[in-house]
Structure formats: structure tokens, C-alpha cells
């Protein structure tokens, strides 16, 4: 099953370099394999830990999206707002149908490095 338009925010309690954790654990490897096999992309940015508590800081929470919607997720970030939880808030915006599509890249730390929507994918698939 590969969902078409899914954004999934999860308290994964797992560590993997895909979501910028300095370490990878077994649960992280299993989750990364699951996401990959279901056509889901992680959209975490390298903007700080999602857990801050008495045992330290960790990158345990994952935001994943299907290929059909991942490019519509904008400005995904970990909030610096104080909460009563040991988890930090994760915020993002979603581009809507009414937004103007632009291929301009913004500066900063991003997980997506290429303007993949600009490619001629039909021609690419024919060549593969």
C-alpha cells in the first residue's frame, strides 16, 4: 500500500539519520525501512531535537509524507515555544491548490536539495 496524499506526524521513539538523529537505533532502522517500502518520505528538517527532558535531548519524532503531498509541506520546524510536555511542538504549513507554484529555492538547511518537480519524469522513466 502506497498512500497518495498522507502527512503523518508520529511520536516514533526511534532514532535514525534520516530524521537527523545523531544516532541510529534498531527501531529507527525498522521505521526507515517501513517508510521506504510504503513510498513515504521524511520531511524533518535539521532544526533541533523534538524531545527535551531530564534524560537529555533526542530526535524521536518523525514527520513523513507521501510523494504526492511532500512537496506541499512548507516550513516544517521544531518550535521553541515552551510547553508542559517533554516533546517540542512541530509546526508546518501546507501549500494549497490556490497557492502559486514556484521552483525558487530558499536558503537554509533543507532535506530536499533538488527541484524534482521541474524534471521531465516521463522521459526519465522511458530511459530507465
Image: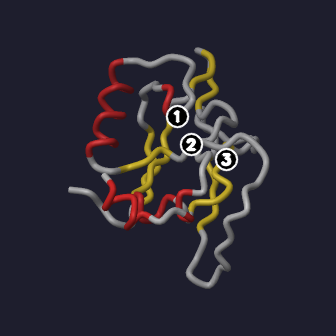
Which is nearer the N-term, disc 1 or disc 2?
1
76 displayed left or right of 71: right
88 up-or-down from 21: above or below: below
**Point 37% across, 50% down: residue:** 40
Mark 2 crowdedness (10 Å alpha carbons): few <14, some 14-19, many ≥20: many
Task: Please provide percent x and percent y for residue 64.
Answer: 45, 49
Residue that badge 1 annotates: 19
What mark, if any, has residue 82 been given in the picture?
none
**Place of residue 26 in the rendered image (x, y in percent of width and height, measured from the top left):** 33, 19
Q: Rounded to the nearest whole Å, what is the CA distance between mark 1 and mark 2?
A: 5 Å
Secondary structure beneath disc 2? loop
Q: Nearer the viewer, residue 44 or 49?
A: 44
**Closer-to-camera residue (83/18):** 18
The residue drawn where x is 42% and y is 53% is 8
Task: Characterize the local packing of mark 1: few (<14), some (14-19) or many (20 or more) Cα atoms within 10 angstroms.
Answer: many
Q: Quadrant of the N terminus?
A: bottom left
Report if the CB atoms under discs 1 and 2 are less than 8 Å apart: yes
Kindly identify which residue carries mark 3. 77
How many numbered discs?
Answer: 3
Mark closer to the chain start, 2 or 3: 2
Under circle 1, the secondary element is: helix
Find disc 2 in the rendering and name its residue: 44
Picture coordinates of residue 69, whole percent (x, y): 46, 64
Amino acid at each position: 500500500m502506497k498512500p497518495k496524499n498522507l502527512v503523518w506526524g508520529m511520536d516514533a521513539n526511534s532514532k535514525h539519520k534520516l530524521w537527523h538523529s545523531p544516532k541510529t537505533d534498531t527501531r529507527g532502522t525498522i521505521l526507515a525501512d517501513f517508510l521506504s517500502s510504503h513510498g513515504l518520505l521524511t520531511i524533518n528538517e535539521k532544526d533541533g531535537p523534538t524531545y527535551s527532558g531530564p534524560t537529555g535531548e533526542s530526535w524521536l519524532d518523525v514527520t513523513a509524507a507521501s510523494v504526492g503531498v511532500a512537496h506541499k509541506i512548507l516550513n516544517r520546524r521544531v518550535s521553541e515555544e515552551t510547553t508542559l510536555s517533554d516533546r517540542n511542538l512541530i509546526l508546518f504549513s501546507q501549500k494549497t491548490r490556490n497557492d502559486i507554484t514556484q521552483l525558487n529555492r530558499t536558503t537554509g538547511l533543507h532535506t530536499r536539495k533538488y527541484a524534482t518537480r521541474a524534471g521531465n519524469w516521463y522521459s526519465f522513466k522511458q530511459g530507465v
